Amino acid sequence: GDLLGNVWRFDLTNASPSSWKTSTYNNGSTPTPLFTTPTSTGTVTTNGVSTSVTYTQPITTAVTVPIVPSSLGPYTRVLVDFGTGQRTVQNATSAATYQSGQQSLYGIWDWDMTNWNTLNPSTILQTLSASSNTITTSKLQVQTLTSTTLSVPTNGVSGTRTVSNNTICWNGTTGCNPGQFGWYINLPSSTNEQVIYSPVLFQGAVFVVNTTVPSGNSLLNCQSNLDSGWSLALASDTGGVLQQSAFNQVSTTSSLVGLQLSAVGSPSFINAYGRNFMINNTSSGIGNVQNPSFLFPRLGQRVNWQQLR
């Protein structure tokens, strides 16, 4: 990803580095991104003077690349999941600043796997013929977050979030006209929430990301407020829910996918005594441990093997 919201793919399959190139998605020779995040316009008023501004959705963290089952046949589909946002660190003359405008989470189908399939006939990935498949948000399924504040914070959790579970009608599927190329979720613009820490793909099926809600500190104010934020665990292929509540120790609501933990950095996972634990540091400097109950929206796949003699 880049600061203009483009998602690029680089073809490194040739044995000669001089032949490595940026992928194209339009049957041409000009490098083209898989997807470009949308822009929006707004008005900023300073000292009574209004100025028109353009808001962008930069990608400043790593992307994740889940491989998920395809409804088009026996082959799997490659997605690129990521969030948008940007933090400019504090310096001697200004406080830390964050990207303006609404930011989002995305899951985009990398639909052109023709070259891969030619080179790897034993591992066929779902592909479409190269055509006019420029992906915009109108070709993505929207999912919606709903937040709830807890009356009594528990284990560092001050709020919970649920998400919609709308079905994606994938492009190329019978009856899907026009077809879709993935999903997106708009983060609340009222809080300037965004993604500045790299997301994590847990066991290939769960898209886990810590979002940040800026505190809005000013160098002219001696009080220093802490950033807050949400830890979200979404189905990597749909942006929707898993088979059950991701955090059922907090609530058994099946669509529960988020906790307000004010986590910073990327989440870490360990397995102990047959249980998975999600570990985060928080903006207050206090660690937080959760015991998520991730049940995947699909069958698991073998990821390694061992020969026994």
Image (tube, helix red, strand yellow):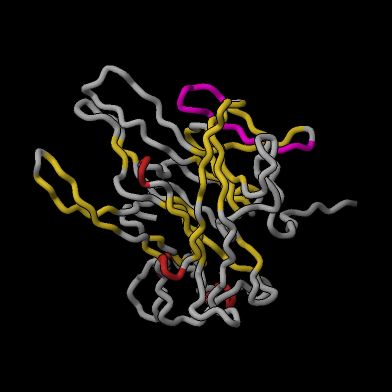
Magenta region: which residues? 274-287
Q: In which quarter of the image is the N terminus?
A: bottom left
Q: Which residue is drawn at 71% across and 50% down?
A: 295
Q: How many marks?
A: 0
Image point (40%, 68%), residue name: 136
Q: In the current view of this chain or complex, which residue is farthest to the front? A: 151
Residue 239 to residue 152: above or below: below
Identify the residue at the far top of this view.
222
Residue 290 percent location from the top left of the image: 64, 33
Between residue 47 and residue 202, name the one nearer to us. Answer: 47
Residue 172 horizontal side relative to residue 139, left or right = right
Residue 53, x across and y down, in percent: 20, 52
Q: Where is residue 230 in the image (x, y as percent from the top left)?
A: 50, 38
Residue 53 placement, left or right of 236: left
Q: Is residue 284 above or below residue 46?
A: above
In the image, is residue 134 part of the stretch drawn in magenta?
no
Residue 65 percent across, percent down from the top left: 55, 57
Q: Is residue 218 above or below residue 8?
A: above
Quadrant of residue 119 within the rendered picture: bottom right
Q: In the image shown, does 8 or 22 lie closer to the viewer?
A: 8
In the rendered structure, the answer to whether residue 103 lies left or right of residue 276 reads: left
Q: Look at 56% across and 76% down and name the residue there.
A: 127
Which residue sits at x=36%, y=70%? 32
Q: Is the magenta stretch mostly helix, strand or loop?
A: strand
Figure quadrant of residue 125: bottom right
Q: Is residue 117 left or right of residue 73?
A: left
